[in-house]
Image (cartoon, grey):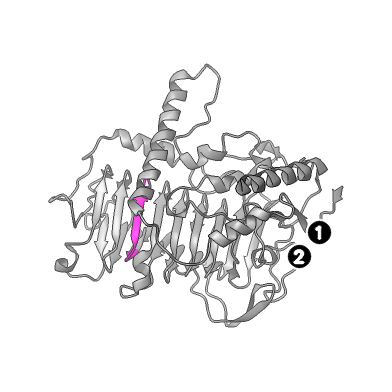
Amino acid sequence: MMLQRSCIVLFSLSLFVPHMGFAMLNRTLLLIPHPDPELVAHDVHRRVNASLWRRQVMDTTDQAGSSPCFTGNPIDDCWKCDPNWPNNRQRLADCGIGFGQYALGGKGGRFYFVTDSSDDDVVEPKLGTLRYAVIQVEPLWIVFPSNMMIKLKHELIFNSYKTLDGRGANVHIVGGGCITLQYVSNVIIHNIHIHHCHPSGNTNIRSSPTHYGLRTESDGDGISIFGSKDIWIDHCSLSRCRDGLIDAVMGSTGITISNNFFSHHNEVMLLGHSDHYEPDSGMQVTIAFNHFGEKLVQRMPRCRRGYIHVVNNDFTQWEMYAIGGSGNPTINSQGNRYTAPTNPFAKEVTKRVETPDGDWKGWNWRSEGDILVNGAFFVASGEGAEMRYEKAYSVDPKSASFIDQITFHCGVLGVGGRNNNLGMWTTTGSEGSGGLDSYNDYTDEMSGTGLTNRLSFSVIVIAFMFDMILYLSMLL
């Protein structure tokens, strides 16, 4: 069956999927924190250590001329080592870690091919546009068959159970409002450039197939997470937005922010609505394997209340501070590398924002196994804190080699990413997912055109049989 390039390509990998109903019933919008956040934190450490161990084994047993796949990054090692990953894209949903690891995204749903980069009508979006996809009620795995620059007129409001999967293409989202996740759950955003977002609004915007309404002016965040749970943002490159690059407020929880590249921005990330907003006390966010790069000033993140796990990130030369907070958040910093700027007055990693010294002494902020470079120091506090400032080179520098290894592929993969390439879609891809050309054939065009794909009937049959097996296993 030939699918025309001018139409939206929708195909089901799960016909009449009974088990999706169970999944959706189990994952409600009740913003309930994980009963044991320390257990989740230890799970991240366990998976990192296991991945690093596999990498070391591969290095010691590597044969001449071979290229070991394992990188030491447990997320990437989960899916990138599969040479057939383009035909098994939904495997990504099984690779999350940390507090956002339960985000299903569009797993089990249909694939939607974005074939139109326009955003002309925010009330009646066209088939083929990204806006049409994200407002749908059903689970969707959203992919891009070609490079695209999507210039939003106004904020892009997501519904629940969506995956934005930019692998195999060079996809940029810019313009008005950018991405809004408001009172939703189970969203995965992967491999997307998000930049130059600015305030917009005071107009009607559609948020579902059955509802549109007046939206006040947005803040101009890259990604705004508002009263939402089970959110995973992975391998994105974010920069140059009017307000925050990622802000999570109003009781949002169950969030993982991983493998991203942040640059050229002032207030990078805000976690928590206000010091006095009680629902944020249950907020749980994992910040892992990111590179906080050049021209960043502050808020990496800035935390209010909640439980924040900052693990194995690379922080390079902030201008004011890296990690700040108020309202007594719990900050668990493990295995990061903090490189201070040359400014002798900005060496401190931490900042208690607008809080007298006597008020924060009991806050639980800890630093374990962090590497402190160029005079950086982390002021710990609370139970079990060291009674001295941590200085540079105070722990085994071997950890720094792991940081290079784990964060080497931060940001968007492929063209436009850092030190890596995933290739691009072919026009003759089989099994409904498209293949990959050599990166030498990749162009920098960001057009909104689609492409021709062939859909094998056998894939639908196999997918249906797989779904039936899963369903029967649940009944037994």
Residue positioned 70% across, 61% down in the render? 117
* Residue 3 counted in the magenta span: no
Quarter of image, res 46? top left
Image x and y of residue 221, in percent: 49, 68
Q: Is residue 431 visible?
A: yes
Check disc 1: other Cα within 10 Å, few if <14, some if 14-19, many if 20+: some
Q: Is residue 304 magenta?
A: yes
Dot 2: element: loop
Is the residue 330 above or below the residue 356 in the image? Answer: above
User: Which x, y percent locates residue 155?
Assistant: 58, 71
Question: Pointer 1 and pointer 2: residues touching (CB < 8 Å)?
Answer: yes
Looking at the image, the residue that sits furthest to the right is 1
**Residue at point 40% right, 53% down?**
286
Regarding residue 347, the answer to whether it shows in the image is no
Residues shaded magenta? 303-314
Q: What kind of secondary structure does the magenta stretch mostly adopt?
A: strand
Earlier sequence position, callout 1 versus callout 2: 1
Task: Note whether 195 is above or below 370 in the view shown.
Answer: below
Is 468 or 455 nearer to us in this picture? 468
In the displayed image of the protein, which residue is found farthest to the top?
Answer: 64
Q: Which residue position holds label 1? A: 7
Residue type at tag 2 = Leu
Q: Residue 415 vs residue 260: left or right?
A: right
- Name the secondary structure under disc 1: loop
| Residue placed under numbered mark 2 in the picture | 127
Q: Residue at x 35, y 45 (%)?
A: 42
Label 2, residues with CA under 10 Å away: few <14, some 14-19, many ≥20: some
Identify the residue at image location x=68%, y=68%.
119
Is residue 120 shown above or below 337? below
Whole-percent x, y for residue 205 in the image? 63, 77
Pick the residue in front: 371 or 99: 99
Identify residue type, mark 1.
Cys
